[in-house]
Image (cartoon, rainbow, N blue to C red):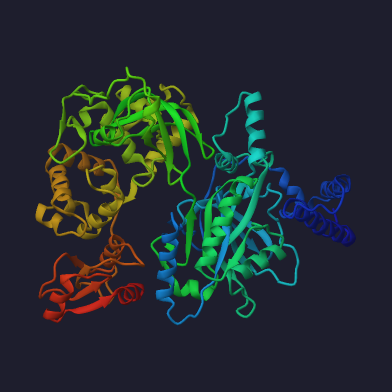
Amino acid sequence: MKVDSEVKSRVLELHKIINEHSYNYHSLDNPTIEDSAYDALFNELLELEAKYPGLSFSHSPTQRIGSEPLEGFNKVDHLTPMLSLENAFNTKDLEDFNKRIMERMVSENQVNFSCEPKLDGIAVNLIYKEGFLHQATTRGDGKTGEDITHNIRTIPSIPLSLLESKIKAPSLIEIRGEVFIDINDFKEINKKAKTDSEKIFANPRNAAAGSLRQLDPRVAASRPLKFFAHGIGSLDFGKDTSPKTQMEVFDCYVSWGLPINPLTEQANDINECISYFKKIESLRGQLTYEIDGVVFKVNSFDMQQSLGQVSRAPRWAIARKFPAEVGSTKVKTISFQVGRVGSITPVAEFEPLNIGGVVVSHASIHNFDEIERLDVREGDTVQIKRAGDVIPQIIKVDLSKRKKALQKVKPPTACPSCNSELIKLENEAILRCNAGTNCPAQKTESIRHYVSRNALNIDGLGERIIEMLVQNNLVSSLPDLYLLKKEDLLELEGFAEKSASKLLNSIENSKETTLSRFIYALGIKEVGEATALNLSLNFLHIERFLLASKEELIDINDIGPIAADHIFNYLSKKDNQDQIKKLLKLGIKLQEVQIQSDNLLSAKVVVITGSFTGIARSQLKEELIRVGARVSSSVSKRTDFLVTGEKPGSKLKKALDLGVEVLEEDDVLRILKQ
């Protein structure tokens, strides 16, 4: 059907009018027309789009209703990585943050900051092209997120097309922000869910996350999701018109119809930042949404670029977190869990307690020395805090409420899972079961570790499914995962054709991985992600790693005698060697480690001494190894460079005596970037 130009003009005019009224209502909380008048405009647009399908644009306000469900989530790389933030837990941490900035910006007379509450919501990345919402993704791992455009389109406060203003929208921009649910709206969601016998959410953040993780956009459309913009990624703006500061970006956002937190302010120095934090902390209980701290960013983009970043966090921003909330409850039981390497961990189960909007009912007590220190017993009334607002922790026993009959907790003498005798090594506070994978609990935990996100990342293999596989003798070792058949899974509770195929595909996809992930996945004691990376960078190939001597291991940075013993003992066992070879035979393919060889530090012997302000020492070692440097622990005639931080110690004197070239922190970071 041919579309009359007047009809198209009216449709586009309705877009503009409805978007402006929607912004006034949802973002400014200042409606300018009656609901009935708004509904009339909206219905007129619906009727025109129904009559002229060619005028039903993806950026139309009617698209918020929700389209057909998707088959699954697509992975999308961010144009610019979404960085994490360093945390500050007290005023001194903030002052130290400012000190590091001032030391790096010695030529600047003043550094001011943008300040805003840190929402406890879900980080999202919005891409606008030519002023229209093109794509929306979750943060994911910071580099890659999931496409949730279908759900983001349903959020009324996120414009599908940027409003026209004096500040022209760029041809492309990544806008970072937070999706959240107000506290009262959250209560209503749970109230309705309880009435309908549906899932109850633990807190507003979980409710928001659950809404965005739906394949059916009608679910997100039914939830009262809101949005505040707070950051920027890639930007294709004219050089002269591009915003120069964070606060200018906020002005742009407001002019384009994007909501920002109304409590956002500028501080002229760190003392004003500290005052701002105190103000927001005093307002926290009055806010309609949940926050867990305050974010401070260096305002100037030029300064931000000059300060740079460390690993996944910028040097120019910090999150000042609120103190952990504390609550009181009663311990019901104290049981013992068996870890992946046989460690026995006491776990307290207590009467459920709501701390900062999160219901907690369990807390690890770490070890038996901690039980002795706390003198916690079954039946005690205890104080619980969420460490860093995340991990539940018992901090104190209320002895005034203790009943005399309560018995001290006695450590077990046998493994709770396999009944093997427990041992306690000298100078350790941990009891261990040495049965290895002959212990069902250790077998299950080793598989859980192998399939975990930072290891082989086998999606769909959760704790319950792993336990079923072990209990039904379908999996007794890691290679057995790759021998599973669809008919095996279909016999298990909860599996159908589609879910069984999906899990088998996920297992098959895990065969393509990196050497560092594979080493980490093996679950060798004392080998975390950083150590696994160091091992992969030093040995390069799995065959060389399998033949590693204790001397070679000790010579690797971050690997001391104890870790070297654990790794060497693991590799010395025939069963472990056979398991690795079987995994490789079953199709595990390890990407070769790529080491840069054209850097000034490539093939050079480098020693590190002192502490560093702009980069973690372990991260510096990794970066040096990545460019082909050989990092040694002691200075000798063979040393090419000594990298010095604060308080360098005797290594500096020895290097100077031997004529070794000395590099300071800024020098080495500059060389690493070349």
Relative placement, left or right, of 124 versus 563 is right
Question: Can residue 79 be spotted in the picture?
Answer: no
Q: Is residue 558 above or below residue 268?
A: above
Q: Residue 236 location in percent, x, y? A: 60, 71
Where on the picture, by quarter, is residue 11?
A: bottom right
Q: Nearer the viewer, residue 588 or 402?
A: 402
Q: Residue 606 location in percent, x, y? A: 20, 71
What residue is shown at x 18% (from left), y 74% (from top)? 652
Q: Is residue 68 above or below residue 637?
A: above
Q: Nearer the viewer, residue 19 or 282?
A: 282
What residue is shown at x 46% (from left), y 36% (from top)? 502
Q: Is residue 664 above or below residue 290?
A: below
Q: Residue 7 location in percent, x, y? A: 88, 57
Relative placement, left or right, of 561 versus 161 is left
Q: Is residue 93 above or below residue 385?
A: below
How many numbered discs sit on the rendered protein? 0
Question: Can residue 506 be spotted in the picture?
Answer: yes
Relative placement, left or right, of 588 versus 194 is left
Q: Nearer the viewer, residue 172 or 594?
A: 172
Relative placement, left or right, of 315 versus 162 is left
Where on the picture, by quarter, is residue 428?
A: top left
Q: Residue furthest top?
A: 405
Q: Residue 177 location in percent, x, y? A: 59, 56
What residue is shown at x 20% (from left), y 66% (from top)? 631
Which quarter of the rendered picture does the C terminus lie within?
Answer: bottom left
Q: Nearer the viewer, residue 258 or 159?
A: 258
